[in-house]
Amino acid sequence: MTTFYGILIPFLGTTLGAACVFFLRKALGDRLQRALTGFAAGVMVAASVWSLLIPAIEQSAALGRLSFLPAAVGFWIGVAFLLLLDRVIPHLHRNAGQAEGPRTQLQRTTMMLLAVTLHNIPEGMAVGVVYAGYLTGTAQISAAGALALSLGIAIQNFPEGAIISLPLRAEGQSRMRAFAGGVLSGIVEPVGAVLTVLGPVDPQAADSKNNTSLVTRLDFGESSFLFNGDQEEDMEEMLVQSGADLDCDVMTMGHHGSSTSSSQEYLDAVTPEYASISCGRGNQYGHPHDETIEKLEAMGVEYYRTDLDGNITFTSDGETISVRTEKP
C-alpha cells in the first residue's frame, strides 16, 4: 500500500492545484505564474538530483571514477525521450503565440492541456523507477527517499494544475470542465509510474526475457491465487525480499514447472495447497522437470498437470476451493 499511495501523491498535487478554479475568480497574474513555474522547476531539479541522480551514481560505485557514466547516459536518454515527445505531440505552451509539434486542428485549450500532459509522462516514470527500486531492494532507495520524490513532484504539480485549470476557465470553459482538464493533465503520471514499476529493475534479472513476466495475485473472500509467469529464481528471490504477501492457496507453477523457477525459498513463501502446471504432452523441454515435482511432493502440495490431467478448473465460493479436471 505504501507504493500505491506514493504513486498517487503527485497526481493528488495536480488535482489540488486544479481545484483552485473553484476558489479563484480569474487567472493568476503573469508574475505569479512565472514565480510558481520557477518554484516548480526548483523543486523538480532538487528531487531529480537527490532522489534519482545521486542514488544512481552511488549504485555504480564499483566503476570507480566512471561511476557517473550510467547516470549520465540515462540522463541524456531521458532528455532525448522528452525531446522526441515534444516533436511528435502537438501542444501549446501558456502565453505562446504558436503551437509546437505537428500541425493539427486541435483547439487551443486542448493543446495547452497536452503541453502539461507531455511533461507529466517522464515525471510519472521517475516516480515509478524510484518505487521499483524500493520494492525490489536492488537499489539503495528507502521508503522515505521514494516518498520525498513523490512529495517534491506533488508540490511542483500544484501550481501546474492551477496554471492549467484557470486559463481553461478564462478561455470560456465551465469551472467543472476546467477542473477536469487540470486533473486529466496529471492522470498520465500514475499510469507512467505503474508501467515503469511493472518492468524489470535489476540488470541481471532483466538479462532474461522470462523475468519480464507479470506475477499476479487474486484474492476472493478467504481464497487466494498466485499466477506466475516465466520468471526465474533470481526474480523469485527479488519478490521474496520485497516483502510482498505471497502466501496463497493456489499457485500456477512458474515457467511450466521448469527447474529454473520455483525455488525452495519461493515455494516456502507461497506455501500453496494446490498447484497447477501448464505444459504440453511430450514437450521438447521436458517440462515439468523432476526437481520441481519432487519439491511439490515433499511439501505435500496437491498438483495437477495439463499434459496428464487436461483442462484444470479451480472453483471458489470465497471459503472453499474445488478442483475439476477434464481430459481432451
Image (tube, rainbow, N blue to C red):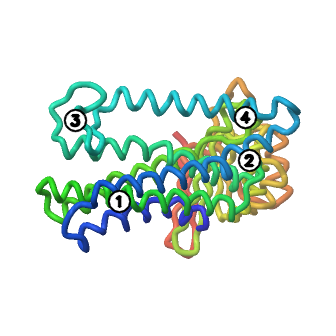
> Which tag, 4 or 2, sits closer to the chain's start?
2
Q: Return the residue at label 4.
A: 287
Task: Name the amino acid, label 4.
Answer: His
**Residue drawn 76% across and 56% down?**
240
Q: What mark, if any, has residue 97 been given in the picture? A: 3
Whether the residues at callouts 3 and 2 have beta carbons within 8 Å, the answer is: no
Q: Is mark 2 on a helix, strand or loop?
A: helix
Query: Circle 3: is it few (<14), some (14-19), or many (20+) Cα within 10 Å?
Result: few
Q: Return the residue at label 1.
A: 32
Task: Name the amino acid, label 2.
Answer: Pro
Q: Nearer the viewer, mark 4 or mark 2?
A: 2
Disc 3 to disc 2, how far (Cα)? 40 Å
Residue 147 at least partly seen? yes
Disc 1 to disc 2, how far (Cα)? 34 Å
> Image height check: is 293 above or below 280?
below
Residue 257 at least partly seen? no
Task: Name the amino acid, label 1.
Answer: Leu
Q: Quadrant of residue 214?
A: top right
Is residue 132 or residue 59 the one in the foreground?
Answer: 59
Q: Quadrant of residue 141?
A: bottom right
Q: In which quarter of the image is residue 230?
A: top right
Q: Return the residue at label 2.
A: 55
Disc 3 to disc 1, how far (Cα)? 20 Å
Q: Is residue 13 left or right of residue 153?
A: left
Which residue lies most toward the front here? Answer: 31
Query: Circle 1: is it few (<14), some (14-19), or many (20+) Cα within 10 Å?
Result: few
> Which tag, 3 or 2, sits closer to the chain's start?
2
